[in-house]
Amino acid sequence: MLIAGLVLAALGGAFHVYIFVLESLRWTAPATRRIFGVRSEADAHITRQLAFNQGFYNLFLAIAAFTGIAFATAGQITAGLALTLAATGIMAAAALVLVLSDGSKLRAALLQGGLPLLAIVALVVSVA
């Protein structure tokens, strides 16, 4: 289960890197605006700085997960699990906040938090 949990955490991290790219690098692109429901290019320009910052939050969560995975695979299991669980826990918590703040965002919350939640379950089971 440890390997499964680490793979799920890596996939969750990869998804958060993808979100970083969309929010920080491609925010004003028409396809990105459609994904996030930004109605116009003008709205995208107004919110660009907020999205840029939020994208980096996603990138830093991914880096934390990847670092934890690296520690765990290098034999530093306790440190690796702690860091991986912290990163995936924050990812899952952010998804929960998203859906609680706007129920219409359930699909986005499942995409954002599903893999991290599965990683948490697998990692906890692996040490139980």
Image: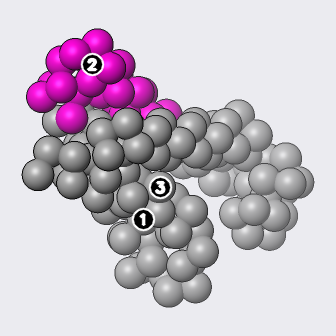
Q: Indicate whether residue 17 is drawn in magenta.
A: no
Where in the figure is residue 88, as x and y percent of width and height? 34, 47
First in sequence: mark 3 vs mark 2: 2
Q: Which residue is mark 1?
A: 95
Q: Amino acid at mark 2?
A: Phe
Mark 2 or 1, closer to the camera = 2
What is the spatial separation of the Cα atoms under label 1 and label 3, in whole angstroms? 11 Å
* Cα distance in 3D space between marks 3 and 2: 20 Å
**Depth check, front residue: 82 or 98:** 82
SS type, badge 1: helix
Q: Do the CB atoms of the residues marked 2 and 1 lie less than 8 Å apart?
A: no
Secondary structure of the residue carrying tag 3 is helix
Which one is earlier in the sequence, the residue at label 1 or at label 3? Answer: 1
The reply, left or right, for residue 80 in relation to residue 104 is left
Residue count near mark 2 (Cα–Cα under 10 Å), binned few <14, some 14–19, many ≥20? some
Q: Are marks 3 and 2 in contact (CB under 8 Å)?
A: no
> CB of mark 1 within 8 Å of CB of mark 3?
no
Camera sees residue 91:
no
Check disc 2 and report its element: helix, strand or loop.
helix
Residue picked out by circle 3: 115
Image position, residue 35 (x, y; %): 75, 62
The mark found on residue 71 in the picture is 2
Residue found at the far right of this picture: 30
Residue 49, quarter of picture: top right
Q: Amino acid at mark 1?
A: Ala
Q: Nearer the viewer, residue 76 or 39?
A: 76
Give neighbour class at mark 3: few <14, some 14-19, many 20+ (Cα, 10 Å).
Answer: many
Region rendered in magenta:
59-81
Check disc 3 and give the amino acid type: Leu
Estimate the spatial distance between the alpha carbons at disc 2 and disc 1, rounded to whole Å: 25 Å
Residue 62 is inside the magenta segment: yes
> Residue 116 appears at what percent x and percent y?
40, 53
